[in-house]
Amino acid sequence: MTDQERYSLLYSLMPLDWTRGGREERVPADVPASAGYVPGVIRLGVPALKMTDASLGVTNPRGGRPGDTATALPAGLALGATFNPQLAREAGAMVGREAQAKGFNLLLGGGMNLVRDPRNGRNFEYISEDPLLTARIAGETVIGTQSVGVLSMVKHLSLNANETNRHWLNAQIDPAAHRESDLLAFQMAIEKSQPASVMCAYNKINDQYACGNDSLLNGVLKGAWGYKGWVMSDWGAVQDWSYALRGLDQESGAQLDRMAWGNEAFNGPLQTAHGKGDLPQERLSDMVRRILRSIYAVGADKPAQPAPLDVAGHHQLALEVARQGMVLLKNDGVLPLAADSEARIAVIGGLADTGVLTGAGSSMVTPTGGFSAVIPVGGEGIMAGSRKQGYLPSAPKVELQKLMPRAKVAYDPGAFAADAAELARRSDLVIVFANRFESEGFDSPDLSLPYGQDALIDAVAKANPNTIVVLQTGNPVAMPWHDKVRAILEAWYPGQAGGQAIAEVLAGKSNPSGRLPITFPADIAQTPRPELPGFGTDFGTPVTVKYDEGAEVGYRWFARQGHEPLYAFGHGLSYTRFDYGDLALSAGETLTASFTVTNTGKRQGADVPQLYLIEAAGEKRVRLLGFERIELKPGESRRVTVSADPRLLARFDLAAQQWRIESGTYRVALGRSASAFTQAGEVRLPERLFGN
């Protein structure tokens, strides 16, 4: 391979250069509009890399492929809420098949940043606040995609936890705490799935940009973890060719770097540096070798022969993710609704007669059949043009009427609280759909529902106490009306079959089984940073975020501080009941727990028993150690065994650069959530150093 051929593999270009407008002349005309393109080396049989954003399905950015649609999956948080790794694998394979059919061989999915701030506009793309749950779901998604011969990745390494001024954000964290939280999630996911690539983040980490962070990329990722794939940048995250010396292997969307920083760093400048001897030949070869290694390891070099897509089957998969991911937060007996009811039902707000909401940004999927509505939101910054409320064509009101044909279902848009309250007074039951739109490139200033929806719910609930609230959000929200309504269903952004899934849960056709993958605070003051970092600053203003909570993310922070959340991580109700018993513990190099789960209710349902560390060698420390999603018939019991990853019992020892389990007593608890334990036990573990 010549050096010119090597150089050509080290940066990608967007076929449509929207920074200047029009087609990128350096990309062949037959390459479809997409996120990125890297030419192959034809004489050596090296395929071109054709990349597509695909966190929630194959995207069609800015409609660059007219008429091209794809299966729109629910939000990443909904997938996390399923606590179902096997379903995540199926979703990953489905997206891989659709990408392959469209001519793409590299998915820019795998979003798995831990949720550290409940106002982050991109949280809906991610999975959870917990390293174990995040790693298991993300890892299986990657496995599914790569099983069909399509390259996949995990992103964004690391601490991409806010969108406000993300290019100028300096995330500061204790290195040991970093290893025990965000980096542990990436480490476990990479071990599990061997992704072809890892995408580094926009932000700085301890004063060094993530894509040029030697200690992160060379020290931890490639050194300690022995990662064999390649590191690609996020789009617009590379300022200098010297990032190559610090671990970056490929610049992505070079035109965005030119726009943001005035240079395509891995095109001319890197070649000049290599010619002067500043970039060693050995490093240049390593960058290329890592890319080639992943292509051949996954089988992306083989000519794709995709079978005809099972569009109906893919729709059913999107429906199943939505069903399993919805979380019934509250129910005082009003749900499920009776299918043969003749009640007068008022459906209010949320464009529930039109469709279901989706998040915006690079993960926004144009659904099968197109959007049922698109509402521009606008704003400032480079992402303002893509800040649009998209509604997928699955209307909850319509679907509910199908399941309850004898009911009299009326709709009010919720534009005026007085109109909605009047309809509520004349109805037997009210269902309010409350939406909060989230988007890449923006954070929310607080946890309130926008556009006066809190006041709307309050007015409706006063008019009719038989009120149910369905939330479509990409984050936790405040609920000042919480005690005035009878039921609350968190539907997230439920994907292209979301309206049907919502209706099925409300009408009892589907038994809710989702569990919260994130903590819902009672108040933003309970979180580590009550004021949004960078709030009120101009675009381009440097922002420093000090993660003083360290490894105590989400429910761990709430346990450490003694805060009582509105709803705890792992919480979720069902239309049946499950009892736990006979907890038995054993210890060796790690801790293993066995217990029995019994469905003591009257209908079949799925449960997610959760095992937590609650004390480690005298230190109060809460960690999810394991979970299992199980489906049981009424009266059925099953014995479950969970073995903890020993790193969840340990601390990272910076001096030794290994994990250390202290000698002592380790207490664990079996529970329904991070704050609802049913049984506890303890074992003794000897001191040991292990891993890296």
Image (cartoon, rainbow, N blue to C red):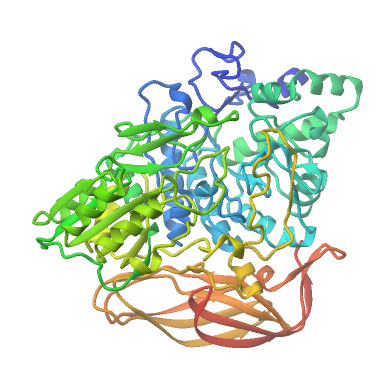
Q: Residue at x 73, y 31 (%)?
A: 238
Between 2 and 692, the one nearer to me in the picture: 692
The answer to whether residue 562 is left or right of residue 670 is: right
Q: Is residue 498 left or right of residue 666?
A: left
Residue 22, placed above or below residue 603: above
- Image location (x, y in percent) of residue 437: 45, 43
The N terminus, quarter of image? top right
The quarter of the picture where residue 365 lies is top left
Give x and y (percent) for residue 41. Answer: 64, 21
Write the residue at 90% across / 27% down: 278
Closer to the camera, 203 or 279? 203
- Image-quadrant location for residue 484: bottom left
Q: Is residue 523 visible?
A: yes
Q: Of residues 262 and 283, which is closer to you in this image?
A: 262
Q: How many marks?
A: 0
Residue 475 lies, in percent from the top left, at: 49, 53
